[in-house]
Amino acid sequence: DGGITQSPKYLFRKEGQNVTLSCEQNLNHDAMYWYRQDPGQGLRLIYYSQIVNDFQKGDIAEGYSVSREKKESFPLTVTSAQKNPTAFYLCASSPVWRVNTEAFFGQGTRLTVV
Amino acid sequence: DQQVKQNSPSLSVQEGRISILNCDYTNSMFDYFLWYKKYPAEGPTFLISISSIKDKNEDGRFTVFLNKSAKHLSLHIVPSQPGDSAVYFCAASAHPMDSNYQLIWGAGTKLIIKP
């Protein structure tokens, strides 16, 4: 089955620690995205990648880092510099970086800082 | 500054009736709009879209209407079914060839279909 997989589903982190969220897709999509969702707000773009070995900052990239070494994988690292990391994180992919191509989403990772 | 607003956090509709979900936007450069549906513990899934060159797009029970002058779009579901109970997100974007293009999302409306 083709799809996009995020892991883990729930993640707890101590303050001051970095943590990496996994995102893998087997859809052969060029473009991948990371979004953050907070209660009462829409999805906000953290980082996106139009193609392998390339990525760009979104609206709220501070305190986050990504890599795109493989087409299938787009991991997100939440660093200790992120002041309010507790949120629901969604990874998505689309065939190309183009507005009329709908994105396919993973099931999300809920990160809680304890 | 929310460029895409879904002012109703929740909506309750009787099964078989029409569900109307609304979305307002402020950026006149937006010219492509999408609706996504999200069930609990799942990622959003694409539902329907509309380009600004149209004022209506229909797909089965789902119809999206766009009123550019009012900067308003709506999603109609007729007839509403229990499986339609979900959170619905509206998203908008500017020109597809804009290198800085990205989708701007509303906060979502939770639709509850009552039996």
Image (cartoon, rainbow, N blue to C red):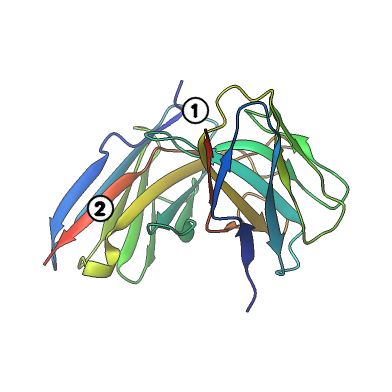
Do tags 1 and 2 sit on the same chain?
yes
- Quick check: can you spot residue A97? no
Q: How many residues crowd mark 2 within 10 Å: few (<14), some (14–19), many (20+)?
A: many
Q: Which mark is residue B2?
A: none
Q: Which mark is residue B111?
A: 2
Kindly give the residue lying farthest to the bottom in the view shown.
A1
Residue A86, compared with residue A97, is above or below; it is: above
Of badges 1 and 2, nearer the viewer stands: 2
Q: Seen in the image, is A26 located left or right of residue B104?
A: right
**Residue at the image position 23 percent from the left and 51 percent from the top:** B20
Q: Dot 1 falls on which chain?
A: B
Badge 1 vs badge 2, beta-carbon distance below 8 Å = no
**Residue at the image position 42 percent from the left and 45 percent from the top:** B90
Q: Position of residue B30 (x, y in %)?
A: 53, 36
Q: Position of residue A74 (x, y in %)?
A: 75, 51
Q: Dot 2 falls on which chain?
A: B
Query: For residue A1, what is the image quadrant?
Result: bottom right
Q: Position of residue A71 (x, y in %)?
A: 82, 59
Q: Secondary structure at mark 1?
A: loop
**Residue at the image position 66 percent from the left and 58 percent from the top:** A94
**Residue at the image position 34 percent from the left and 72 percent from the top:** B60
Which residue is more in the foreground, A32 or A106?
Answer: A106
- Quick check: can you spot residue A44? yes
Q: Secondary structure at mark 2?
A: strand
What amino acid does circle 2 point to? Leu
Residue linked to disc 1: B27
Which residue is more in the foreground, B20 or A59?
Answer: A59
Query: For residue A58, what is the image quadrant?
Result: top right
What amino acid does circle 1 point to? Asn
Disc with the residue nearer the chain's start (1 vs 2): 1
